[in-house]
Amino acid sequence: MKALKFGGSSVSSPERIRSVAKIILSAAKKEQVIVVVSAFQGVTNQLIECARMAEKGDQSYFSVYNKIAQRHTDTLHQLCAKRLTKSDRAIVQKNLVELQKILQGINLLRHCPPRALDVVASFGERLSAFIISLYLNLKQPSQFVDTRGLIITDDNFTQAAVMFDQTTTALQKYFKRLFAENSKKLIPVVTGFIGATEDGRTTTIGRNGSDYSVAIIGAALGVSIIEIWTDVDGILSADPSIVPSAFVLPNISYEEAMELSYFGAKVLHSAAIAPAVAKKIPVLIKNTLNPSAAGTLVSDRVNDWKAVAKGITSIDGVTLFTLRGLSMVGVPGMAERLFSALADHHVNVILISQASSEHTICFAVTGSNAAQVRRAVAHEF
Ligand code: ADP
Ligand code: ASP
Ligand code: MG
């Protein structure tokens, strides 16, 4: 069994969804497949923007909502055309009406807590998986699967942590039954990115989280390989939008992939492969626009490539601080005072360096933490 994930870039338009379907059907000829999809490209951003506008009382949220609704109904009609049934159309419509009501509620209350934001964001994957499953169903039996109720998380909305024991049990039970009750040919199309708390409240597992979803599902079901289909030929030695000469890495180890993704290679969510690593499931990154390219294989195989560095990554929006003073030289405990003060103010430090003369300590934080750093340092020193 194989798990395939198609990111927003692969499901950006009806044409792209048709190419995705070809890839899925060709894989399904050889073995049982499970498909995980993201929202159509850009939709999660639009949903979040829409909720924020509604919260601020900006009535033009409604025109953003209309664009989202129109894009989904257009895609549905273009893909399924005359073979679309009334009840399927009604399901899409019901989702869109529900979304509209939630946005209206946010607008009336002028309040959008993270919990409401997650419900709004969840419509991206719910609609995309449903529409793609309808389209596949015209060619081979397919089943839409909503991961709320299967991926069980805590209630840290927008960044919910997965509760692995409950999730694994729920996934195994659900898919065992689904495959037992249907023909081997059934293709499940599963929502990425979303889950729910034990008591059924909708959550999301962090931006770009569909990579993580497919790894969680692949690991729970013990698939032989996880394929992540995107819009580049694999993991490149650097972000191709910044470094045009970046080249594809044919294979890298799990640790290298985790380092690269943690430090900004958006092609793979940084936590994504952890569940695959635990089960030693290889992860193949492939290009929907160029399916014949070999891609990048991420596995536990240590390769003998002698290059000094395999990749370079960068992250934006970082603030660098320098704490400087002659009175710091040779005084024990200065670093401890600084970092304890930062920890007390809930600041996460992402890089630290100290001059050998000890008269400066330099550290980096994400930009949003900068004000807290000033407060912490002013208070402590
Ligand atoms: P998807 O919609 O398929 O999830 P993403 O936009 O999340 O795709 O990730 C793919 C993008 O990641 C690429 O289009 C590329 O611009 C960017 N990227 C950044 N760093 C790298 C890298 N080192 N290798 C490959 N892609 C990278
Ligand atoms: N649609 C979600 C996002 O844009 C999840 C994903 O694309 O992986 O963050
Ligand atoms: Mg992605």
Image (spheres, helix red, strand yellow):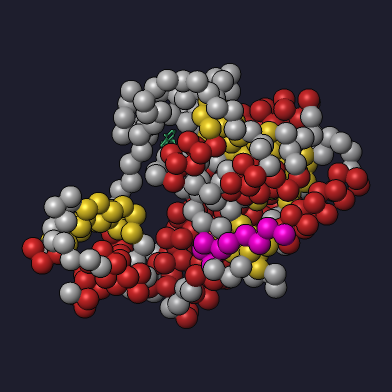
Q: Is residue 160 magenta?
A: yes
Ligand 1 lies in quarter: top left
The residue positioned 59% from the left and 32% from the top of the image is 299
User: Residue 86 location in percent, x, y?
Assistant: 76, 52
Q: Position of residue 291 (x, y in %)?
A: 58, 23
Residue 10 in view, yes or no = no
Q: Position of residue 279 (x, y in %)?
A: 68, 42
The N terminus - image quarter: top right
> Relative to residue 357, is residue 230 drawn left or right?
right
Name which quarter of the figure residue 141 lies in. top right
Magenta span: predominant SS is loop
Give, as a single range, the part of the protein colored magenta.
Answer: 157-165
Is any atom of residue 181 visible in this view?
yes
Residue displayed at 49% across by 70% down:
114
Residue at 74%, 54% in the rendered image: 168
x, y (%) of residue 163?
66, 62
On screen, 252 above or below 103?
A: above
Q: Is residue 305 above or below residue 15?
A: above
216 within the magenta span: no
